[in-house]
Image (tube, helix red, strand yellow):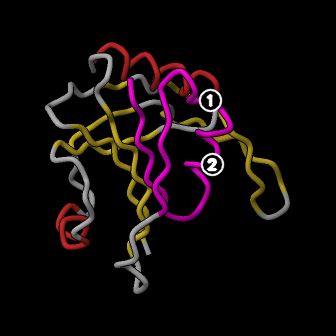
């Protein structure tokens, strides 16, 4: 089972890498270990399971990009700024969270809203396990 998170639009969008070194603490054999890796907001070419996503035949907008971000205020602000800078008022972007598993084929629930209403709770819900399809109007 694999998860793909996509940003989709009706026209090409620029790639964007605003990832930064972030440190997390995880438990390994009962001991806390700090791990520092690049994390945060990233929009890149859609390559991960591209053919599997295409085979689902979901109504995803034609220009698709892999999206990485975390449920943090900085990533929310980066996403909102990116969409506001690269799309015109009235245009709609789609955010897709798709699980590729034996249970594929059932279209994710579709939610709609505006960029102004997109908040940290919405981002948290989008990033939770499960499938979602968000249409965000600029």
Nearest to the observer: residue 40 or residue 14: 14
Nearest to the observer: residue 104 or residue 117: 117
Identified at 27% across, 17% down, the residue is 88
**In terms of image quadrants, where is residue 105?**
bottom left
**Helix, strand or loop under label 1:** loop
Q: Position of residue 37 (x, y in %)?
A: 52, 37
Residue 126 counted in the magenta span:
yes
Cα distance between the residues tagged 2 and 1:
10 Å
User: Vertical placement of 76 versus 93: above or below?
Assistant: above
Rendered image: mark on residue 48: none
**In terms of image quadrants, where is residue 71?**
top right
Nearest to the observer: residue 122 or residue 46: 122
Identified at 33% across, 41% down, the residue is 7
User: Bounds of the magenta span?
Assistant: 109-138
Q: Earlier in the sequence, mark 2 or mark 1?
A: 1
* Residue underneath mark 2: 125
**Helix, strand or loop under label 2:** helix
Q: Position of residue 102 (x, y in %)?
A: 40, 86
In-image side of 15 versus 132 (left or right): left
In-image side of 34 versus 112 (left or right): right
Q: Position of residue 50 (x, y in %)?
A: 20, 61
User: Vertical placement of 17 versus 121: above or below?
Assistant: above
Identified at 55% across, 27% down, the residue is 76
Q: Position of residue 116 (x, y in %)?
A: 53, 21
Rendered image: mark on residue 119: 1
Residue 125 counted in the magenta span:
yes
């Amino acid at each position: 089972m694999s998860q793909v998170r996509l940003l989709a639009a009706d026209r090409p969008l620029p790639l964007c890498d605003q990832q930064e070194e972030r440190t997390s603490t995880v438990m390994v054999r009962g001991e806390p270990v700090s791990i520092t890796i690049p994390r945060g907001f990233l929009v890149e070419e859609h390559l991960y399971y591209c053919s599997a996503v295409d085979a689902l035949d979901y109504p995803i907008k034609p220009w698709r990009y892999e999206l990485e971000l975390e449920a943090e205020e900085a990533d929310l602000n980066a996403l909102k700024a990116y969409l506001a800078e690269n799309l015109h008022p009235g245009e709609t972007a789609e955010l897709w969270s798709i699980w590729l598993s034996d249970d594929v084929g059932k279209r994710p629930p579709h939610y709609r809203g505006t960029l102004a209403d997109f908040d940290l709770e919405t981002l948290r819900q989008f990033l939770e396990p499960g499938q979602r399809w968000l249409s965000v109007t600029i």
